Image (cartoon, helix red, strand yellow):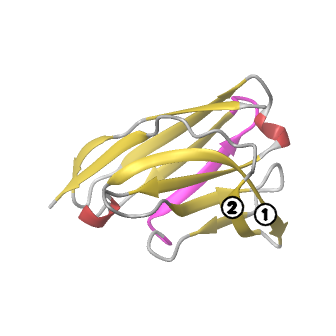
Amino acid sequence: QVQLVESGGGLVQAGGSLRLSCVGSGDTLEDYAVGWFRQAPGKAREVVSCISRTDGGRSYADSVQGRFTIYKDNTQNMVSLQMNDLKPEDTAIYYCATVAGTSSGGNFYVCQPRRDNSWGQGTQVTVSS
């Protein structure tokens, strides 16, 4: 089972950008679809974006569509999330996870954490207004 470690969070003003990284160890990410999730204070964890194992199928939450881009580099065993035009409502702890779903036609459907996924510490993103 792969272990994932998130990094890249920080404090940024509204309209700014951050790039989060999720590095895998113990196994190759080529064998896994990966997703980014976030949890704001007092709210449930929600899916942000997911990417398939190898064919590049992607999905985005409506709230981040057009602002966030997910990348997967299997040679680096890493998944990144480029976040542009950040808004205060993007403030949350961001987590990456191995996910299950279906990739078709460039899209990734029904993204949800795998049963054997183990959540890491996450990385805090704070967007000031």
- Left or right of residue 25: residue 18: left
At horizontal 38% and vertical 58% (from top left) the residue drawn is 84
Q: Quadrant of the C terminus?
A: bottom left
- Left or right of residue 28: residue 17: left
Q: Where is residue 113 shown, x and y percent of the image?
A: 68, 54
Q: Are marks 1 and 2 in contact (CB under 8 Å)?
A: yes
Specify whether residue 51 is painted magenta. Answer: no
Q: Residue furthest top?
A: 26
Q: Quadrant of residue 41?
A: bottom left
Q: Residue furthest bottom?
A: 62
Q: Which mark is residue 51?
A: none
Q: Is residue 16 above or below residue 108?
A: above
Q: Is residue 26 above or below residue 127?
A: above
Comparing 123 with 71, the one in front is 123
Q: Which residue is mark 1?
A: 101
- Left or right of residue 124: residue 7: right
**Judging from the image, what secondary structure is the residue with disc 1 in?**
strand
At horizontal 77% and vertical 55% (from top left) the residue drawn is 52
Q: Where is residue 90 shown, x and y percent of the image?
A: 34, 61
At horizontal 35% and vertical 53% (from top left) the residue drawn is 92
Q: Where is residue 74 shown, x and y percent of the image?
A: 75, 36
**Of callouts 1 and 2, which one flags the residue occurring earlier in the amino acid sequence?**
1
- Residue type beneath disc 1: Gly
The residue range painted magenta reads: 65-77
Q: Quadrant of the N terminus?
A: top right
Comparing 82 with 50, the one in front is 50
At horizontal 46% and vertical 69% (from top left) the residue drawn is 64
Say few, some or many: other residues with alpha carbon within 10 Å of mark 1 (under 14 / 14 to 19 / 20 or more): some
**Judging from the image, what secondary structure is the residue with disc 2 in?**
strand
Q: Which mark is residue 112?
A: 2
Q: Where is residue 111 shown, x and y percent of the image?
A: 70, 64
